Amino acid sequence: MLSYNQVTNSEINNNGVSIKEIAPIMKLNLRGKTREFFTNVGKSLNMILPTEANTSSSSDKLTAIWLSPDEWMVYTNSMNKEIFDRVFKEISSLNYGAVTNVSDQWVCINISGDNLYELLSMSCPFDFSKFRDTKGSTTQTIINHIDVIIHNLGDNNINLFVRRSFSNHLWDWLNDGANLL
């Protein structure tokens, strides 16, 4: 893993929206579809992966986001390399699927507040009407022409994942958008 550099050390609190980077945060990409894959993921992570589109599941320390029928992002607030090593040993080394550490690829931005969905809707084609009321729901969409993954934590609170190469641009856009609310 690279030496982690935050996108920003600041926090935005403007017009009913709070925006901050959550760092460091470990993110794993899991791919597989065999029974052995699901069994070994369940044993090594102590959780069941979501199998319904645009949903998530959680354990006490980990959250899994459904990305496609055979792909998930698992994230946690710790940078515990032992988790990756354990899952890699139980999945990739046995050829049941693929485990990739994508911690350095994705930046996690937490956005909360009463005007959260108004901010996102300013430059996002996704209809948040059902999403906002369904805790644990996820979506992959675009904001200001940038691919993002959004995880609804409930109570007007989301984690937004953006590729590191676009994170500064999105941060600036979120700041400007919050000023316009």
Image (cartoon, rainbow, N blue to C red):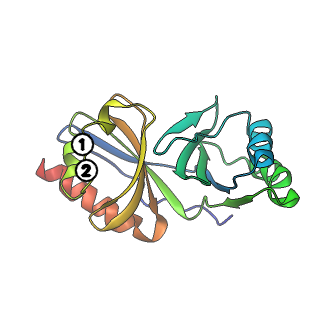
Q: Amino acid at mark 1?
A: Tyr
Where residue 98 sits: x, y (%)? 73, 60
Secondary structure category for the residue under label 2: helix
Label drawn at residue 30: none
How many C-alpha atoms fall within 10 Å of the one at disc 2: few (<14), some, or many (≥20)?
Answer: some
Q: Residue at x 59, y 63 (%)?
A: 104
Q: Are marks 1 and 2 in contact (CB under 8 Å)?
A: yes
Label drawn at residue 120: 2
Where residue 66 sits: x, y (%)? 54, 47
Horizontal relation, residue 26 to residue 115: left or right: right
Q: Residue at x 57, y 35 (%)?
A: 57
Where residue 86 sits: x, y (%)? 82, 48
Q: Residue at x 59, y 51 (%)?
A: 72
Residue under pointer 1? 117
Q: Residue at x 39, y 47 (%)?
A: 20
Horizontal relation, residue 158 to residue 176: left or right: right
